[in-house]
Image (spheres, grey):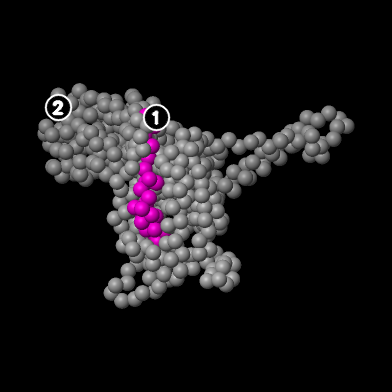
Amino acid sequence: MAQVLEFKLPDLGEGLTEAEIVRWLVEVGDVVAIDQPVVEVETAKAMVEVPCPYGGVVTARFGEEGTELPVGAPLLTVAVGAQEGLDLSGASPSSADTSASVTSASVTSASVTSASDTATESSGGSGNVLVGYGTGAPAARRRRIRPDRLDRTVVQPSASDAPVADALALAPAASGTAPATAATDTARAAGTGVGVVNGQGPVPVVSPLVRRLARQHDIDLRRLTGSGPDGLILRADVDCAIRQAEETEAAQTRTARAAAAPTGALPAAASPAASAAPAAERIPLRGVRGAVADKLSRSRTEIPDATCWVDADATELMAVRAAMNAATGPSAGPKVSVLALLARICTAALARFPELNSTVDTEAREIVRLPGVHLGFAAQTERGLVVPVVRDAHTRNAESIGAEIARLTELARTGKLSPAQLTGGTFTLNNYGVFGVDGSTPIINHPEAAMLGVGRIMPKPWVHQGELAVRQVVQLSLTFDHRVCDGGTAGGFLRYVADCVEQPAVLLRTL
């Protein structure tokens, strides 16, 4: 007899307690291989594909797209064969004749994998559920088992076929859903470039965020004409549809109020008091936005922070950067960004003032000074503000730090950062100058002890060598946990950073 195993939402990273279902990658009745991704979820830190540790037939799914599930909640159930095993390659381990009969009766599109793949998949499960930590075996091609055809099987299974027949029979009974349409299969075969809305047909949508936005506002994507390449539906198309729906609803409300007004009364449109105030929009605090809200609230609640700032003449730093990037020849490397230079200055400053590279253990009432610098940097993405972490920044030079920042920034923009790349920071660098502002009082990224903020670098009048001149000036601000140090230490750190910005040669002493 087949055994039905329940696969629960695993712990996808440190501190994560829930995840939102973005897209199902399998349907009820599909045959899945061990460690095959079955669902795409969005956590507070990243968007990941979750692999299933069992191989067999999907008999039930729990939760629709857009549903938020806690860690440990059931995701799906899989029918797995007993001792004989459910063969995912389309060949029964007991006999080739049995495989042929089952394949001809109920599985018409099965693909054959190698014998080594079959041995791996029929083992029952790997127990590995995080992306990138599978068994290493190539995933078998998914095949569609149509529940509406199972009761028309003309071949009577033998005793050796019992586990396979039992597993297949569980699929329609547990699903409660209709078989997938040909359009659904076509959309699934096309890859992630096509979404499926309510199982009624393919829709040209790439971004899961666009589909979720449409669901939240009850927008039927099948009625939209995409403005992207090949009719691809973009977020701008959904935003336009939302505005049109709101305008239509408001017009209908005004018309209904005017029709219901008593004779002789002013029309609703002509009376400001009679017109209904627009309803306030409610946006759930979940996902990245919710995680940011929780962390910032905790930071302001637990950390007694203070901020100091200083203006610095960055003319020499910009000149040094230009000279470095203009260098040619075998020794010339990739371009170095201003953020990379500032990050290297921060690591040198933290070596002089290690109090700011620490955290506070409130239960033990101890300050924990950390041995290495894992430098976080704030990055604004479509999903919200994220803070990727450059590991062991204290061992890197400006070129290495710049390359890692560029790599992590690209992953952040595409939503491919893993939870491990967003946790474990010890100090954060926040370049809010990219938004065209001069200063800010940043909130510490809990549980760190400090954050350096950098404003825009712009020409300003400045007294240079006793004369008024136009110089490239930047405002630097340091927010620090007053429990780990006093103002003298924070001021010394900020002054050292400013000195390195004004005279980059000061940094050579630490290189």
Secondary structure at badge 2 equals loop
Q: Residue sitting at 46 percent across and 64 percent down? A: 502
Amino acid type assigned to the residue bearing label 2 in the image: Gln
Which mark, by number, is residue 70? 1
Q: Is residue 421 left or right of residue 289?
A: left
Which circle, 1 or 2, is nearer the viewer? 1
Which quadrant does the N terminus fall into?
Answer: top left
* Residue 409 at x, y percent in the picture: 40, 54
| Point 79% across, 34% down: residue | 273
Q: Are marks 1 and 2 in contact (CB under 8 Å)?
A: no
For marks 1 and 2 on the same chain, the one whose residue lies earlier in the sequence: 1
* Residue in the foreground of this view, choosing between 63 and 104: 63
Task: Provide the residue designation for mark 2.
Answer: 83
Horizontal side of residue 91 vs 23, given as left or right: left
Residue 147 visible to the viewer: no
Dominant SS type (magenta):
helix
Q: For label 2, count other residues whose C-alpha is less than 10 Å away and answer few (under 14), some (14-19) or many (20+).
A: few
Q: Nearer the viewer, residue 154 or 374?
A: 374
Q: CA distance from mark 1 to mark 2?
A: 33 Å
Q: Which residues are magenta?
A: 340-363
Q: Quadrant of residue 360?
A: top left
Which quarter of the figure has residue 111?
top left
Farthest residue in the bottom direction? 329
Does residue 446 sit above or below 458 in this rendering?
above
Q: Position of residue 121 (x, y in %)?
A: 19, 37
